[in-house]
Image: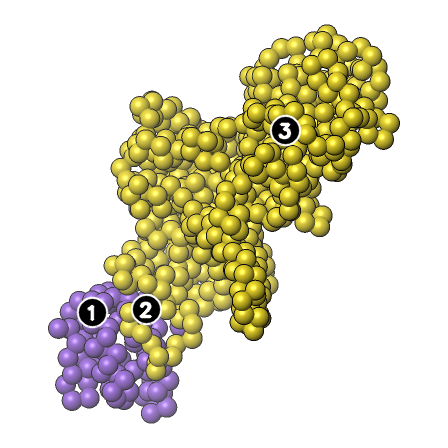
Chain colours: A yellow, B purple
Amino acid sequence: MDDLLEQFLIESRELTQQATDDLLALERDPRDAARIDSAFRAVHTLKGSVALFGFAAMGQALHVAEDLLGLIRAGDVAADRPVIDALLDCITCSDIWIEAIATTGGLPPSATDESRRLQAALQAPMANGESAAPAPAKREDPAWLPALLTRGAAAVASAQAANQPLVALRYTPSADCFFLGDDPMAIARAIPGLVALHLDGREPWASATLDAYTCNLVIEALSTAPADDVRAAFRFVADQVVITDVVALEDSDASAPVRQGVGAEIGTRLLRVDAGRIDALMDIVGELIVAKNALAHLTAQVAEKDAALARALDANQTDIARLVGDMHRVVMRVRMVPLGQTFRRFPRLVREIAAKLGKTVDFEVVGDDVEADKGIVDGLYEPVLHLLRNAVDHGIEDASTRREAGKSAKGHIKLDARRANDHILITVTDDGAGIDPARIRAVVKARGLMSDAALAALDDSAALDLIFAPGFTTTAAVTDISGRGVGMDAVRSKIVALGGRVALTSTPGVGSTLRLALPQAATVSTVMTVRIGSDRFGIPMDTVAETVRIPTGRIIPVRSGEAFVLRDCTLPLVRLAALLNLPSPPRTTHDAKLLIVAAGDQRVGIEVDGFAERVDVLLRPMTGLLAGMSGVLGTALLGDGRVLMILDLPELLG
Amino acid sequence: MSVSLEADVIRLNGVCRVEDAEPLLMLLRADPRRTVELTGAGPFHAAVVQVLLALRPSVTGQPGDPFATTWLMPLLSVGEAARQSRKGSALNLGPSNPRLGQGTGLS
């Protein structure tokens, strides 16, 4: 793909996200001037780059959205619910278009009609906005305003005498604006209704070091023209100018607080790197670990021939091992990204889901600055979205039911993330109807998923756990939102694939809480290697509960299968060779070597031909044709150059 | 070329563009006592205005550009006025073009 287009895609995704964040914040506080500015800037910039690539339909819709945001900024239109809806709709469509551009290189054929619909929706509030507008939000006066008003006292006085509204502006041209062909003085010359002008240096003037081609000017001015006309004069440098209405002078406070919030992260030094490059770096580090292990083998061989040389090599090898370890840690840290990258997409989605279902939900996100490996953060999107959908659809009751139950009509859902040692804990809590274990039992019984006796033996928390069973769904009616055959089992398997666990607690009438525990970084795992004949396979250590040897005589044939007794419990026995469809010759040894593995609620003994060493490996997920292969988590390269398949035992057993 | 040097006077002629800033800066750095003569000149590019603001040379003459006369001259001659008043001949270079607004310039 064209580099420029690729950059466009990255940036436009960020811009739509920024606009979404701002619009959702505006919905909570329609007078947040900083958010209005930020949304305006995002849409403005997006429109600019869209125009650059000639996606006309998208550009037109964004253009109208920008106009609407301009009116909101000027206080002519109130940022009420329908207005925010229309704007969010436009941003959502833009998102869809951006993804279409990413895959097909162009807008979908429906874009023209869609764009017309969006434009109409966006224009509606503008048409009747003028009259319906409330008094403009009282904004904090910027810190530079009092000095400007003092300098222009005469102009202020005469404007007040003539009862003319005053607009103050501060234009800080970018340092490289001369290179971009801007002439800030020509722009200042075009300010309508100019009544006062002041020039200053952004940095104090230094005649000795002045660079004639770096713009250090700050231009401040007062104008009696309407704010929109003044703004129009700055339309090409809208991001470099602050324009504010001068409200009655008595109100302006010299110690006006500086605006904060939106621009907070601008100061951070960031380097945008394609994730693929970090992955490539990670691959190299992985191979370096392998090469380092091979060096250890060599050193051992040399020791037999020349002890002195071996000692020197050994010292060297230790250094290399340490450096490789350091490098691995650093690269892992580079891959750490805040959960916010995934979480920030949820507020809009929750709002949409709730709107579709006619519910109102307060959605709260805590701990989106907690960091985890990028693979984990990206992988969380689907399962967590599923949990949120469930919470809105099945958890939160409709407003009347809630009121009857003595709760507030608005539901509350909280997504909370925190760190615990090297794990991250994520909880999704709702204050909805909760889940009744009795109802779960009834559903399981009706579907015949479990025998009556087994069901009766379950305590309530084990019964709740059944919602993670494949094929389980409690809603009678399949809604548009959830219940499309993808159940909580999909959530559990996704989380397990990320190396995590999921658990549910619920109190009927009070709400439910889902807890996810995930590793912060899943890329290095400890595996146990096992032997089947001459083949070796890896099994992640965290799936193995214990290893035991039992005399073959204690294996009991049970119909077509086998079982054995471990500490007074009868466990099924499965031969790994059979699971993998490898030939399994009759047992020749007196001992059977078993891995005890938890499969769902049951433990299972997996028989192998032999245990080998534990190794730390860099797990590579299967790619390409092998990506869909079940039962295999991935592969790892061993020190001797062999490839080790890492098995997913729970999946093989299921 | 809009910038020329005649004895100790740097003369700006006609429209001053961004490329005039560098020669003007060089001439003023070479001798900071040089005065800048603006009669009939303008409009001025911001880069040129910036050099005048930063090096604060004595500025004389009335530009041909009304915007410059009304708004820039008062700002550019702040140092000038101070120097002149020390010499005992204060110059009043306030806004002089009534077409461009009812206010006074900021100083």
Residue B17 is left or right of residue A652, and the answer is left
Q: Between B41 and A98, which is closer to the camera in this rendering?
A: A98
The residue where tag 1 is placed is B19
Q: Amino acid at mark 2?
A: Thr
**Are discs 1 and 3 located on one and the same chain?**
no
Of all residues, the one furthest to the bottom in this rendering is: B87
Q: Amino acid at mark 3?
A: Leu
Res A472 label: none
Residue A329 location (% of width, % of height):
57, 57
Secondary element type, mark 3 = helix
Q: Position of residue A153 (x, y in %)?
A: 46, 65
| Image disc number at residue A214 | 2
* Residue appearing at x 25%, y 59% in the figure: A181
In whole angstroms, how far apart are the C-alphas of marks 2 and 3? 71 Å
Residue displayed at 51% across by 50% down: A640
Label 2: which secondary element: loop
Badge 3: chain ID: A
Residue in the picture at 60% in, 13% down: A478
Q: Which quadrant of the figure has residue A559?
A: top right
Q: Nearer the viewer, mark 1 or mark 3?
A: 3
- How packed is label 1: few (under 14 Cα within 10 Å), some, or many (20 or more)? some
Q: Residue A292: x, y in percent?
A: 52, 58
Chain-order first, disc 2 or disc 3? 2
Residue type at the position of mark 1: Glu
Q: Which residue is mark 3?
A: A576
* Quarter that holds the N terminus of chain A: top left
Label 1 chain ID:
B
Q: For this rendering, which residue is in front, A488 or A428? A: A488
